[in-house]
Amino acid sequence: MKVVVSIGGSVLAPDLGSERVRAHADVIEDLAAEGCTVGTVVGGGGVAREYIGAARELGANEIELDDIGIDVTRLNARLLIAALSEQAAPSPPEDYESAGAAMHRGDIAVMGGVTPGQTTDAVSAALAEYTNADLLVYATSVPGVFSDDPNETDDAQKFDELTASELVDVIAGLEMNAGSSAPVDLLAAKLIERSGVRTIVLDGTEPERIADAVRFGEHEGTDIVPEGADDQMTYWASDEQ
Ligand SMILES: Nc1ncnc2c1ncn2[C@@H]1O[C@H](COP(=O)(O)OP(=O)(O)O)[C@@H](O)[C@H]1O
Ligand SMILES: O=c1ccn([C@@H]2O[C@H](COP(=O)(O)OP(=O)(O)O)[C@@H](O)[C@H]2O)c(=O)[nH]1
């Protein structure tokens, strides 16, 4: 199976903790050892938001802030590469062709950001489309996609399943500034809709949840299903043909 795993910065590096990076690297290594071709994209986390906040106070515009965020995502990617050692391409690919080439030769590709005006969510969706991945997993800091921000709205309801176009509708109303928070960004949602890639949004704070989703399709997050998929089991079972 070819899988792209998007590890949110809030999950990998809310602060700089090597043990957390090691735990995610172990899961990624296990999946590769089990025969998966793995591409990973990591976010900027708390450090990115500290730099973005300081630079915003200094008068940087949103594109300049995005560039700062991208640099931090690539630093986080280097942390994960350090933990993966020889199994990972030695530096964070800065475009999809380089990442795809690394995956094609059997390396684990670990990307950060690519270009301003988006987040690593879009990078993950684009890498999944570029490599014709079988599955795209977003490991974020909440248990899936909700009707509202669950950290702001007590009665926000988690979606167990959304079509890609429904996901676009949920995300479309969220702000999009450098450092803003969303389970996936709008461009990612549109790329998922266009490509039809099988996608799961789950709480990745326990890395093993990522492995269970990849191995068995088992998770407590949100399945993003193609338009017209009649039910969850049929959807997963179709993969066995
Ligand atoms: N509709 C929503 N569903 C889920 N989370 C949401 C939603 N709207 C906003 N959020 C916020 O998005 C956050 C996840 O985005 P982000 O902080 O960028 O995480 P990541 O590090 O995974 O990219 C959640 O912690 C939550 O507070
Ligand atoms: O391709 C990218 C990836 C990231 N970013 C910037 O870097 C920040 C941190 O990335 P991301 O939001 O994906 O990190 P996470 O939310 O996972 O911590 C984003 O908010 C953007 O400002 C960007 O401009 N382009």
Image: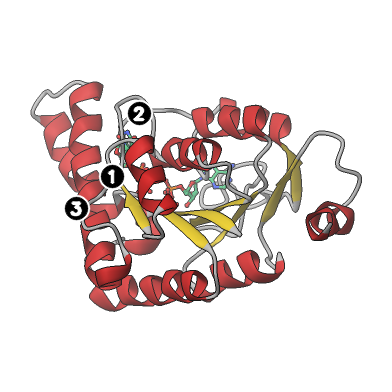
Crowding at dot 3, Cα within 10 Å, few <14 / some 14-19 / many 20+, comes out as many
- Give how far apart the Cα atoms at labels 2 and 3 are: 21 Å
State the image quarter where residue 143 is shown: bottom right
Q: Residue at x 22, y 63 (%)?
A: 79
Asked if disc 2 and disc 3 are in contact, CB closer than 8 Å, the reply is no
Q: Quadrant of the N terminus?
A: bottom right
Element class at badge 1 = loop
Element class at badge 3 = helix
Q: Is mark 2 within 8 Å of ligand 2?
A: yes
Is residue 7 visible to the viewer in this orientation of the structure?
no
Element class at badge 2 = loop
Image depth: mark 3 or mark 1 in front: 1
Crowding at dot 1, Cα within 10 Å, few <14 / some 14-19 / many 20+, comes out as many
Q: Residue at x 40, y 77 (%)?
A: 26
Q: Give residue 93's mark.
A: 1
Mark 1 and mark 2 lie on one chain; the one further toward the N terminus is: 1
Asked if disc 1 and disc 2 are in contact, CB closer than 8 Å, the reply is no
Q: Is residue 176 above or below residue 119?
A: above
User: Residue beneath label 2, please?
Assistant: 177
Q: Which amino acid type corresponds to the residue marked 1 in the rendered image? A: Pro
Expressed as whole percent of the image width and height from the top left, the position of residue 3 reads: 55, 55
Q: Which amino acid type corresponds to the residue marked 3 in the rendered image? A: Leu
User: Residue beneath label 3, please?
Assistant: 75
Expressed as whole percent of the image width and height from the top left, the position of residue 214 reads: 62, 65
Crowding at dot 2, Cα within 10 Å, few <14 / some 14-19 / many 20+, comes out as some
Q: Which amino acid type corresponds to the residue marked 2 in the rendered image? A: Asn
Q: Is residue 52 left or right of residue 38?
A: left
Q: Is residue 140 left or right of residue 47?
A: right
Q: Residue at x 71, y 64 (%)?
A: 217
Q: Is residue 69 above or below residue 15?
A: above
Image depth: mark 1 or mark 2 in front: 1
Q: Give residue 227's mark.
A: none
